[in-house]
Image (cartoon, grey):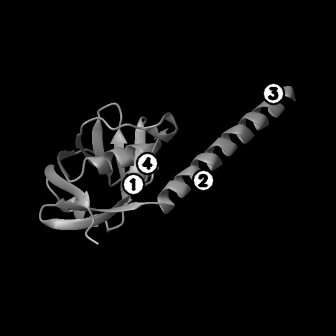
Amino acid sequence: MHTIKISLFAMAIILLMCLTAFAQQGDSQEKSTKIALTIEGSTYSAVLYDNAAAKDLIAKLPLTVSLNRGNRDYCGDISPLQYSREQVQKGYRNGELAYWIPGQDFVIFIEKEETGASVDGVVVLGAMTSDIQPLFSLGRSIQVRIAPAEQ
């Protein structure tokens, strides 16, 4: 019986932590900066959230990065971004833009969200607001220009 109480208490704490994290992410999404990603001559809309890593990226714009196709994303080297520990998470959603700490990579996640919980060291920078389907037909290596959106 004692073990059940401890397990329930632990589950309640984990649930509270998850809800707090989602609430904080929601706050940062409300104060977003519109950006444009130019890939293979096409422009895609996205937003960067109001967090330390996204602000560091915004300060470096415009920026062109070389990305390679992985089994769930396009990713490539970027100069290190400053982030807070609270931003680091496991997992992602399709369409999210992220900084992957272990590889110091800029990432566009495009698939396999359902198994993405195993991806650790993710700092979500923002998200695509354009449809991500056209990204599936791109080549193995792409150049992405990241710039503030024209008003």
Label located before the other in sequence (1 or 2): 2
Q: CA distance from mark 3 to mark 1?
A: 40 Å
Q: How many marks?
A: 4
Does residue 47 appear left or right of residue 135 in this picture?
right
User: Which residue type carries mark 3?
Assistant: Thr
The circle drawn on residue 23 is 2
- Which label lies toward us, 4 or 1? 1
- Which label lies toward us, 3 or 4? 4
Q: Are marks 3 and 1 in contact (CB under 8 Å)?
A: no
Of residues 64 and 92, the one nearer the viewer is 64
Q: Could you say whether the residue bearing mark 2 is in a helix, strand or loop?
A: helix
Tell me: residue 150, above or below residue 17.
below
The residue to which callout 1 is attached is 126
Q: Are marks 4 and 2 in contact (CB under 8 Å)?
A: no
The residue to which callout 4 is attached is 92
Q: Could you say whether the residue bearing mark 4 is in a helix, strand or loop?
A: loop
The image quarter in which residue 44 lies: bottom left
The circle drawn on residue 22 is none
Q: CA distance from mark 4 to mark 2?
A: 16 Å
Q: CA distance from mark 4 to mark 1?
A: 11 Å
Give coordinates of residue 11: x percent, y percent: 71, 39
Residue sitting at x 18%, y 61%? 38
Label located before the other in sequence (3 or 4): 3
Of residues 16 and 79, the one nearer the viewer is 79
Of residues 59 and 7, the one nearer the viewer is 59
For the C terminus, give its image quadrant: bottom left
For the N terminus, give its image quadrant: top right
User: Which residue type carries mark 1?
Assistant: Gly
Tell me: residue 150, above or below residue 52.
below
Quick one: label 1, few (<14), some, or many (20+) residues within 10 Å? many
The residue to which callout 3 is attached is 3
